[in-house]
Image: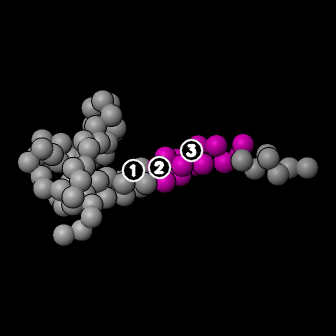
């Protein structure tokens, strides 16, 4: 048994409760099934869900950054014009 399994993991819900086009919550990045089954999951399963949610969040942030840079490429270039 690992130390993380000794402690109950808190529900990651932040009260946003809107889904994106992939079906993940925009607040906690869990799928519908993960949200519905959270209280049935073991500590290990919850840990795995949280790990996946962190990866989903990181991917969403990279995609948002890429979209922003594609929307304003001229503005970024102006910073280096002398």
In the displayed structure, 1 sits above or below 50; it is: below
57 and 23: which is toward the camera: 57
| Distance between mark 1 and mark 2 Cα atoms | 6 Å
Q: Is residue 38 magenta?
A: no
Which residue matches tag 1? 57
Contact between labelled residues 3 and 1, with CB atoms less than 8 Å apart: no
Which residue matches tag 3? 68
Colour scheme of the picture:
one colour
| Distance between mark 1 and mark 3 Cα atoms | 16 Å
Secondary structure, magenta segment, majority class: helix
Q: Nearer the viewer, mark 2 or mark 3?
A: 2
Question: Residue 14 placed where, x, y %?
Answer: 33, 34
First to last magenta residue range? 61-75
Secondary structure, mark 3, is helix
Residue drawn at x 12%, y 52% is 41
Which residue matches tag 2? 61
Q: Is residue 73 magenta?
A: yes
On-image quarter of the N terminus = bottom left
């Amino acid at each position: 048994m690992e130390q993380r399994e000794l402690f109950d993991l808190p529900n990651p819900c932040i009260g946003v409760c809107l889904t994106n086009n992939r079906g993940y919550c925009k607040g906690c990045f869990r799928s519908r099934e993960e949200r519905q089954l959270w209280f049935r999951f073991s500590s290990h399963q919850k840990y795995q869900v949280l790990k996946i949610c962190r990866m989903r969040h990181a991917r969403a942030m990279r995609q948002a950054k890429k979209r922003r840079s594609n929307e304003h490429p001229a503005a970024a270039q102006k910073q280096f014009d002398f």
